[in-house]
Amino acid sequence: MSVAPWRGDLAGALHRNRRLPYARYLQLATIGADGRPANRTVVFRGFEENSDRLQIITDARSQKVGQITENAWGEACWYFPKTREQFRLSGRSILVGADCTEAFLQRARRTAWEKLSDRAREGFAWPQPGQPRAGLEAFEVATPDPSEPLPQFCLLLLDPDRVDLLQLRSHPHDRRLYLRQEDGTWLVREVNP
């Protein structure tokens, strides 16, 4: 598999902003069953092996899972403050939960779980997200097995078919659109900012 042309730009932005701990955070927007947009900050967990799909983790009990199930379209917006670059990555979301039957996706889910810190794994054993606040004792959980994902642990993959890169350092600003074609190749267009 060849790497999408926008990956080099994104890798460069990540590298140049690597000293900023929040450079791995991006915003993910989805559409709920009621047609309303929902936006939240998530952590970039790398790319799926041999793929251009961004990896994000989530809890099967969270609202975003229902939004992804109802409407698989999503868009991530990622701003790198040091280099003043914005990436908007739009495409289909793929939810990989405990019930996924594709072996390679389950391997990716397990690998993502294994890479988490113990503290991050513990969050998946907490009470259900979005419900009335539980007492503190409900959050005192045993550390889950690092080799076996909890059933509510999901890997969320964003498979971009459109990437909009805006570089704000130059005057005038530079903007490129990357559009995935039917045959899997990418069309690159310089456009006005």
Image (cartoon, rainbow, N blue to C red):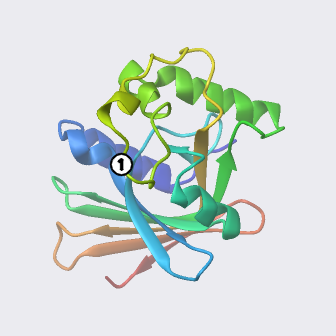
In this picture, is 47 found above or below 171?
above
Q: Residue at x 48, y 38 (%)?
A: 46
Q: Looking at the picture, how far across and down is residue 169, in whole percent? A: 17, 66
Q: Nearer the viewer, residue 124 or 4?
A: 124
What amino acid type is highlighted by mark number 1?
A: Arg
Left or right: residue 39 versus residue 163 is left
Residue 95, percent from left and from top: 66, 50
User: Disc count in the image?
Assistant: 1
- Give the residue at mark 1: 133
Q: Quadrant of residue 96?
A: top right
Q: Is residue 92 visible?
A: no
Nearest the viewer among 20 and 155 is 155
- Residue located at (68% from left, 61% from top): 185
- Residue 45, above or below 170: above
Which one is nearer the viewer's eye here, 154 or 108? 154
Give coordinates of residue 33: x percent, y percent: 63, 76
Q: Quadrant of residue 154?
A: top right
The C terminus lies in quadrant? bottom left
Q: Quadrant of the N terminus?
A: top right
Confirm whether residue 23 shows in the render: yes
Provide the secondary structure element on which disc 1 rests: loop
Q: Position of residue 165 (x, y in %)?
A: 38, 67
Q: Is residue 22 above or below residue 41?
A: above
Q: Relative to 48, is 107 on the left or the right?
A: right
> Residue shown at 62%/33% (left/top)?
49
